[in-house]
Image (cartoon, coloured by chain):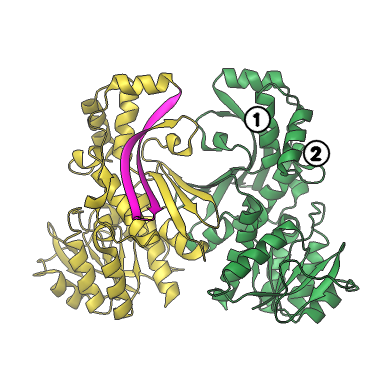
Chain colours: A green, B yellow
Amino acid sequence: MRIAVLGYGRVARALARLIAQQRHVYPFRIVAAHTLRHGTAYDLYGLPEEPAFGPAAADAEEFLDRSQAEILVELTALNPDNGEPAASHIRAAFLRGMHVATANKGPIACCYADLAEEARRAGVEFRFESAVMDGAPVFNLARHCLPGTGVIGFAGALNSTTQVILDAMRRGLTLEDGIEEARRLGVTEADPWFDIDGWDSACKAAALANVLMDARVTPAAVNRRGIGRLTPEKIAEAERAGKRIVLVSRGRRTPQGVKLRVRAEVLDARDMLAQARGTSNVLVLHTDTMGELGVFSQNPGLDQTAYGVFADLVDIARSL
Amino acid sequence: MRIAVLGYGRVARALARLIAQQRHVYPFRIVAAHTLRHGTAYDLYGLPEEPAFGPAAADAEEFLDRSQAEILVELTALNPDNGEPAASHIRAAFLRGMHVATANKGPIACCYADLAEEARRAGVEFRFESAVMDGAPVFNLARHCLPGTGVIGFAGALNSTTQVILDAMRRGLTLEDGIEEARRLGVTEADPWFDIDGWDSACKAAALANVLMDARVTPAAVNRRGIGRLTPEKIAEAERAGKRIVLVSRGRRTPQGVKLRVRAEVLDARDMLAQARGTSNVLVLHTDTMGELGVFSQNPGLDQTAYGVFADLVDIARSL
């Protein structure tokens, strides 16, 4: 199947390598790539991992039209306010009868219900496994392994930057030291306060609620407080009491609708969520049939994010 | 779809309730049930949760022939030596062109490769989600959510009885007290030494290796040591050192084939496997594409085991 990639950065390169490794079993081919910085590349026979970019297409529409791709892989940078420009790219692909796989949480957090409806009307598939947990099965798990199951709520330690910062503060370092450490590890977004203030966690909470609980919310609807006011003293006090502070995204179904919250929670040290360190994430789904069911990934990186997109591509191909 | 149930105990009743709850979306119908103790019941329009059992069919073959079912749900008691009689029941169903879902780890641990091959030749489906982790997605997860992924190894805290016993011993009680507690909670097999000696964990290791790593082993091939020689003193010593003793099933791919081991391991208290308590199980898969990926279920019971069978039924129906 022919793939167009919008946003050709490190995840896209990891995806290109994975597609090359798996090409004998899964015949995917990246035939077009577009970045704001480097320009646009097309090759119907398949681009190399490092494409020779030529002049940039005038816009995403022109890029999609020329690509002759069947699937758009959307990997542009996140805008948590409205999910743009990713949402428009995704819509443009749907209008052209293209399936879409994205690792971008913005559109899922901001306008999932509309996008899912547009995909349905266009008769195409829409996948986003890497939007919340770096490729660990969450959405495809619910889709394929939990038939007849309702998600009543969830709790997740889903933000790597704050985990690295809190680990540093547990060792007596400052918030600023922690930010430096997260930068060195390459886990922060461009602006670390997006993580520290809980916006990333709010986006992930909204995305989970929209997809798994049919919530139709945006990140702004999440009751959100970050870790910015935590001091090393507060953290040490929790540790002494056998507790552990973790930034947690929670959702639960109530008679008034789905309630979403992001907080630095003081957890029992033996809580599964309290084990999340570094880039490791933990998510617990509260379900009506399978009780409390959890998923975690240990220190995932870009290769795992790329794998989530790859799994989406295979899922799209299988569903046709 | 019409279902025949072999072994109509507590899991079967929970499954019958679940099928009734979901009948408007998933049109499954239990049309035949057979137990050694109570006899046999047939009703093409669907049996109630508590069937009126009549005279027992002469054997499983006669039961299957008369049932007119499309799917066999195999829930008879476990025999870890050779997976019988479940394996023969499953083969009899395949020969009649029936799909099979089972919660029985014996056949998966003892002769999975042969059964999978026989199902393929018969053109029918074979599922067993509840064989290892009480219904939590493991096998269906690998089947649907991990395309192109090789499992290099695994580590699991998969035995509830020893977890209850070790919890009791941590509180200063004896092994015998722990057995009593596991009995009261209803988590032991008929013979608790099957769990204590690590046979249950060995069966689960063999089942995981057979399905996820194409290992073609039996439980006897597992290097196995149970918790029978652990003393409260040893357990307290580990706790004082910030460690935690857990019965762990491990598998790893080596140049000499898949190596399997069951041991009471001394784990770091923050290890994900060290959080398994009561009936909660934790499994970590070591993969080539998704790194270390984990699944856990918090205090699952019979309803979750039944749900795993239900998920298998849906998966069979979807695959047709």
Q: Residue at x 71, y 62 (%)?
A: A12
The chain carrying label 2 is A
The label on residue A64 is: none
**Does residue B233 sit above or below A86 in this rendering?**
above
User: Magenta segment: does it hold B258?
Assistant: yes
Tell me which numbered mark, 1 or 2, is placed earlier along the sequence.
1
User: Magenta segment: does it hold B114?
Assistant: no
Let me know if marks 1 and 2 both belong to one chain.
yes
Residue B52 appearing in the image = no
The label on residue A193 is: 2
- The secondary structure making up most of the magenta span is strand
**Does residue B300 sit above or below B312 in this rendering?**
above
**Bounds of the magenta segment:** B242-265
**A26 or B274, nearer to the observer:** A26
Disc 1 element? helix
* Side (left or right) of A141 relative to A166: left
Q: Amino acid at mark 2?
A: Trp
Q: Which residue is mark 1?
A: A167
Residue A6 pos. (x, y %): 78, 67
How many numbered dots are placed on residues in this image? 2
Q: Amino acid at mark 1?
A: Asp
The answer to the question of whether label 1 and label 2 lie on touching residues, with beta carbons closer than 8 A, is no
**B229 or B177, nearer to the observer:** B229
**B220 or B311, nearer to the observer:** B220
* Side (left or right) of B311 relative to A92: left
Quadrant of res A318: bottom right
The chain carrying label 1 is A
Disc 2 element? helix
**B143 or B301, nearer to the observer:** B143
Q: Residue at x 27, y 51 (%)?
A: B203
